[in-house]
Image (spheres, coloured by chain):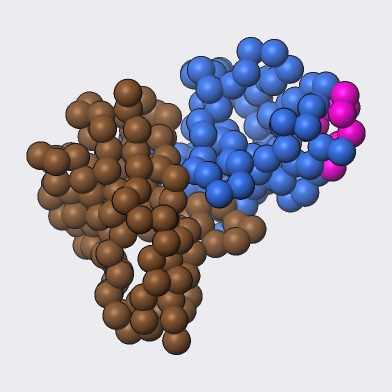
Chain colours: A brown, B blue
Amino acid sequence: GESVGLHLPTLSVQEGDNSIINCAYSNSASDYFIWYKQESGKGPQFIIDIRSNMDKRQGQRVTVLLNKTVKHLSLQIAATQPGDSAVYFCADNARGNKLVFGAGTILRVKS
Amino acid sequence: NAGVMQNPRHLVRRRGQEARLRCSPMKGHSHVYWYRQLPEEGLKFMVYLQKENIIDESGMPKERFSAEFPKEGPSILRIQQVVRGDSAAYFCASSLNSDQPQHFGDGTRLSIL
């Protein structure tokens, strides 16, 4: 069945290092992917998105890579800061307008 | 700079009561989505609405749950005769159109006593 899942539930990084959060999806029909950041007590905050006609997209300090061959995408955060500590979700549109969310990865930044 | 506004932020109900959750989309957005999140889980889609129309309610339980997005006013998610299992965070998102990013509110945390 279709699913979006994450390889690592918790990621701890040192402040200033780069972070890489991974996500796998199973539905080949997915053509739109989004990364969200969720802080405690808040709603998911849009970070960056990518469509299936692209392999890479860059934002401010963030890069999303999409590998359609192995159905994998990753979120790279450069120079990770304490404010980046949160739960990160990938989501895809395998079901049309309905986003399918992964379980989430906790990012902890150590000062 | 109004994003998606949800109220109330916290709602406590006793079993058997009704819960009404409100969502005002971002200005100019006519597509609204409701999701539910249990602790330490991802969000699960419930329903997708456009003004006055339910487009997809495949994620919403057939009984006790309903949603609307009237021509004027916020979108409402209504849960009748609440049970303990309805305790969760309910998030609303809106988008400019169906292929644009969905932007989320900060949710309503529903607790059932």
Residue B19 at x, y percent in the picture? 80, 31
Residue B84 seen in the figure: yes
Measuring 55% from the left and 49% from the top, which residue is drawn there?
B40
Residue A109 at x, y percent in the picture? 43, 76
Look at the image and tell me in which quarter the N terminus of chain A lies: top left
Residue B18 at x, y percent in the picture? 84, 27
> Is B14 part of what is drawn in magenta?
yes
Q: Nearer the viewer, residue A31 or B29?
A: A31
Measuring 80% from the left and 26% from the top, which residue is drawn there?
B82
Measuring 83% from the left and 21% from the top, which residue is drawn there?
B81
In the rendered image of this protein, does residue A99 appear above or below residue A76? above
> Is A63 part of what is drawn in magenta?
no
Look at the image and tell me in which quarter the C terminus of chain A lies: bottom left
Q: Quadrant of residue B21?
A: top right
Magenta: main secondary structure? loop
Magenta residues, as a range? B12-19
Q: Quadrant of residue B113?
A: top right
